Amino acid sequence: MRIAIAGGSGLAGTPTAEIARTRGHDVVILARGHGVELLSGSGLTGALRGVDAVIDVSNVATLKPDVSVSFFAGATRNLLAAERAAGVGHHIVLTIVGADAAPDGYYAGKLVQERLVEAGSTPWTIQRATQFHEFAPMMYHSAKAGPLHLAPRARTQPIAVREVAEHLVTLAEQPPAGRALELGGPQEESLVEMVRAYARAIGGPSWIPAVSLPGTFGRAQRSGALLPGPGAILGRQTYAEWLDELPDA
Ligand SMILES: NC(=O)c1ccc[n+]([C@@H]2O[C@H](COP(=O)([O-])OP(=O)(O)OC[C@H]3O[C@@H](n4cnc5c(N)ncnc54)[C@H](OP(=O)(O)O)[C@@H]3O)[C@@H](O)[C@H]2O)c1
């Protein structure tokens, strides 16, 4: 198959591209670093020639709803229009478990993305997954008060990004499935303990206070609304196993 991966150079996109190539597929990367700008549509038409399926793992790093909506709506509209013109038969998109529980920040854009895909003319699969294990390092580096690292209280069931990538390629090899079963990690974790364990693994500070993030997202995280529901497909690698593999550990 010929598979185009929007965001194929990112955290999820890199292993997705690697796994697809290993399985013998032709892979096209849709990313600015590869000459494709999803928001202007520049480079898309040529890149989608002969493509059977598109996996969308593009991303914008923001907590602002307007920025998130503008990116995911713009990129998705351009992708779907170019897919229609190129006759692409399957659009697969990665979104997030529990996105509807906190629709006022980053997740606002993810919900718009899902709705556009559902309403689009390319046959589709929407795959929701929980946070990747890398979520804890991301929090360690971004949740700070001056030099002090903070650990936000949250219930999470993190998954190895490589297992998400394997699953996305499998979806691309199969017929469009609509809303796929949620994908989550093998066990629930406390984000506070994940951040502290990451700090220990990299020789960071031994004291990291727990904080409750304000707003809908903070409440959704603490309530368990971002945990996978019954019937979800669960990954294999635990956070502790992932941490053991870190080069810094
Ligand atoms: N992180 C999590 O815990 C988690 C959990 C579940 C689902 N997800 C979802 O997984 C997806 C991928 O996240 P990620 O963390 O892997 O993303 P990432 O590492 O930030 O990668 C973003 C990718 O998008 C490309 N990109 C960004 N803006 C672009 C533009 N204007 N035109 C073309 N390409 C553009 C980037 O390449 P260039 O910079 O070269 O353009 C890069 O390849 C997201 O949709 C996210 O919602 C994430």
Image (cartoon, helix red, strand yellow):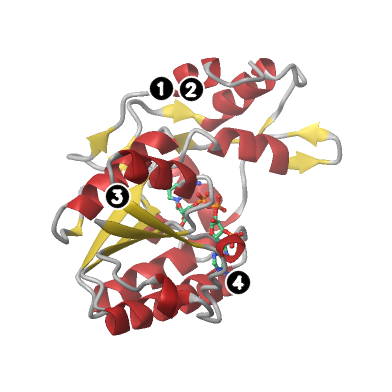
Q: Nearer the viewer, residue 42 or 187?
A: 42
Q: Is mark 1 within 8 Å of ligand 1?
A: no
Q: Is mark 2 within 8 Å of ligand 1?
A: no
Query: Given the image, on which type of amino acid does mark 3 rest?
Result: His
Query: Going 31% across and 30% down the picture, which residue do you hit?
Result: 235
Mark 3 or mark 2, which has the lower sequence index?
3
Residue at the far right in the pictured view: 146
Can you identify the residue that label 1 sits on?
238
Label 1 Cα crowd, 10 Å radius (few <14 / some 14-19 / many 20+): some
The spot of residue 212 in percent (x, y) is 61, 41
Query: Given the image, on which type of amino acid does mark 4 rest?
Result: Val
Can you identify the residue that label 3 sits on?
25
Mark 3 or mark 4, which has the lower sequence index?
3
The spot of residue 174 in percent (x, y) is 15, 53
Query: Going 38% across and 47% down the picture, which residue do you hit?
Result: 225
- Measured Cα–Cα span from mark 3 to mark 2: 27 Å
Mark 4 or mark 1, which has the lower sequence index?
4
Q: Nearer the viewer, residue 215 or 190?
A: 190
Residue 213 visible? The answer is yes
Query: Which mark is in front, 1 or 3?
Result: 3
Residue 31 shown left or right of residue 20 in the figure: right
Residue 242 is labelled as: 2
Residue 109 is labelled as: none
- Measured Cα–Cα span from mark 1 to mark 3: 29 Å
- Asked whether the residues under the numbered discs 1 and 2 touch, taking CB atoms below 8 Å apart as contact, a structural biologist would say yes
Can you identify the residue that label 4 sits on?
67
Query: Given the image, on which type of amino acid does mark 1 rest?
Result: Thr
- Measured Cα–Cα span from mark 3 to mark 4: 34 Å
- The quarter holding residue 34 reads bottom right
